[in-house]
Image: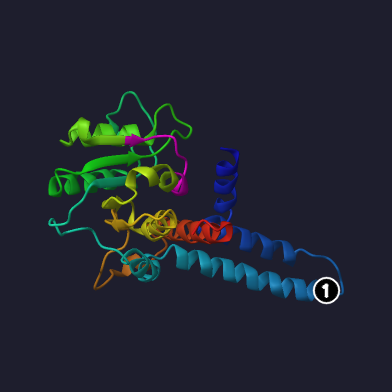
Amino acid sequence: MFSFTLKKLIARLFFPLPLGIEIILLGWWLTRKKKKFASQTYRKVGRVLILSGCIFLYLVSCSPFIDQIMYHFEHRYLPVQDNKLDIDYIVVLGGGHTSDEFLPANSQISAWTLPRVVESVRLKKMFPLAKVIYSGGIINDAQSNALVMQKIAVMLGVPKEDIILNKKVFDTRDEAKALKNILKDKKFILVTSASHMWRAVALFKKYGLKPIPSPSPYLSKKTSDYLWWSYFPSYKGLQKSERLFYELLGMAWAKFKGYI
């Protein structure tokens, strides 16, 4: 658990908003250097860093710019549409929730995870004989993410007896490792967000599994034109950039550790 928390903490230092602020602060610090022989050089470098940080923050919060990158990143895989496939399992990876006893499960689950559950329900209707595996552990909460997803799926008509929970996991690698014995030599569909899918597929393949991707949700969609105000910095653009950076950092870490 400690290594998981440390990994998440370090990764957040390289998310787009913190990274942009760090570049600007470094530039500001350099402009304040007092050493005579190097003060001019420091100030020049500092001003360049401040300008670079501001440009960087604009680009990562500008939806039209980040959409061009995100679209190609997410659309490596498309949702399953062929109902003639022979499918044994539908595996749904967790994405977080916040428990609140006064709210139904669909209002507790994160915005990243709810579309995954809905996608699993769609797939279950296409492949009624398939079992559904909801995967997600307990992270700073009283109940597992897998359990919350199960509650929503049952609300939406998935029979509880057709659901399997994978609860003792922290990240995608844990999920693949925990499920390898169940899924070995089985045909299964893997459901996770489109930005996360390429890394998830790579991690599952590392354990000798052959997932059939069916991503949901997609943050970027094909848009023919943008309205002029779309070019203003926005939280929506920054949110997309954050997911992109998160996955790039995750893939870099997985390759560094030899997980993929």
| Residue 168 on the magenta segment | yes
Q: Is residue 155 visible?
A: yes
Residue in the picture at 30% in, 37% down: 149
Q: Looking at the image, which residue is at 51% across and 64% down?
A: 57
- Residue 143 picture quarter: top left
User: With respect to residue 243, does 63 lie above or below?
Assistant: below
Q: Is residue 32 left or right of residue 8?
A: right
In the image, 132 versus 150, the foreground residue is 132
Query: What residue is shown at x 31% (from left), y 24% (from top)?
Result: 102
Q: Say whether residue 104 is left or right of residue 19.
A: left
Q: How is the image coloured?
A: rainbow
Residue 209, compared with residue 171, is above or below; it is: below
In the figure, 35 relative to 9: above or below? below
* Camera-nearest residue between 196 and 238: 196
Q: Quadrant of residue 239?
A: bottom left
Horizontal side, residue 222 vs residue 195: left or right = left
Reply above or below: 243 against 169.
below
Q: How crowded is mark 1: few (under 14 residues within 10 Å), some or many (20 or more)?
A: few
Residue 220 x %, y %: 31, 62
Q: Residue 108: give x, y in percent of width and height.
A: 33, 34
Q: Which residue lies furthest to the front in this view?
A: 185
Can residue 108 be seen in the rendering of this structure? no
Residue range highlighted in magenta: 165-174
Q: Where, quadrant-wise, is the N terminus in this rendering?
A: top right
- Looking at the picture, how far across and down is residue 140, in whole percent? 48, 32
To which residue does mark 1 refer? 38
Please, what secondary structure does the residue beneath circle 1 have?
loop
The amino acid sitting under disc 1 is Ala
Rendering coords of residue 139 (x, y %) = 47, 35
**Magenta includes 101?**
no
